[in-house]
Image (spheres, rainbow, N blue to C red):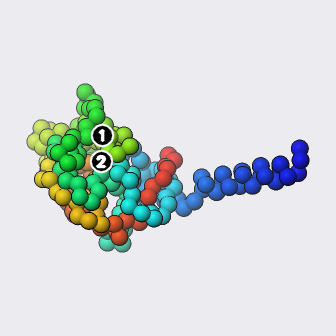
Amino acid sequence: MNKYVLIFVGCMFLLGSCAVSGPRIKLRTAALYPNLHTSGQCRVRTLESLPERGSVVLVTVDLLETPRRVVGMPGDTVAVIDGEVHINKKSHLKSREKRRRTCQAGVSPRCSCRIHWEKVGSRRYAVQSLPPSGEIGDARCDRNPDTPATVVPKDHVYVLADNRDGALDSRHIGPIPVSKLGKQVVACLR
C-alpha cells in the first residue's frame, strides 16, 4: 500500500476515535430511569445554542449538575397530566404498558409503576410513573401532582425527569434559564 494512503487511513482513524471520545460523566441520579442508568458513563458536549426538544441536558441548580430531558421550548405551554406531558394542549403519549411492575430507581420498591412511551421532537423514550395517588394505599407511592399549564418564558426551557415521580424537575422549580444549562448528553454506556 502507498505510504500516503496509510497516513491518510491513520489520520482518519485518529479523527474517528476523537469523535467518539470526549468528556464523560458518571450519572449519580435515577432521574432518567428507565432510559439512562446511574451505573453508566455518558459522553457530553458543551451546548453552543438552544438544545433540541427531547434532548438530555445537564441542569445546574445550586452548583449541582443533574440530567433532565428538555420538553418545552420558549413560548410553549407545558402541562403534566396523569404523569404525561402535554405541549401546547397536545398529549405526547405514544403507548402504555398494559401491566404494572415494581418501581425501579428512585421510588419505594413497595410501589407499582407503569411505563409509557412519549415522543417529543424527534426523540421517543420511556417514562416510569406511579399510578394515580392513593391507589396503593402507601404514602410513599403517591405520585407528583399534576401541573397546570405553564408558558415557557423567553430564554428558558421546561425540563422533566423520565422517572416522573422519582426526581425534581420544572414541575417543582419552574422553567430553567438557558444560562443554567451545562452540557448536553450525547451518548451513554452501561
- Residue 14 is left or right of residue 133, and the answer is right
Point out which mark residue 163 bears: 2
Secondary element at tag 1: strand
Residue shown at 51% from the left, 47% from the top: 189
Image point 41% across, 47% down: which residue? 36
Q: Nearer the viewer, residue 64 or 59?
A: 59
Q: What type is the residue that disc 1 sits on?
A: Glu
| First along the sequence among labels 1 and 2 | 1
In percent of width and height, residue 92 lies at: 26, 40
Quarter-wise, where is residue 175 in the image? Answer: bottom left
Q: Please tell me in which quadrant of the rendered image residue 171 appears.
A: bottom left
Q: Residues within 10 Å of mark 1 (few under 14, many from 20)?
A: many
In this view, the residue farthest toward the right is 2
Mark carried by residue 73:
none
Furthest residue toward top: 98
Work out whether 35 lies above or below 31. above
Q: Which numbered disc, 1 or 2, marks the residue closer to the eye? A: 1
Q: Which mark is residue 118?
A: 1
Against 188, residue 131 (above or below) is above
What kind of residue is marked 2?
Answer: Asn
Going 42% across and 63% down the picture, which residue do you hit? 49
Horizontal and vertical percent position of residue 137: 11, 41
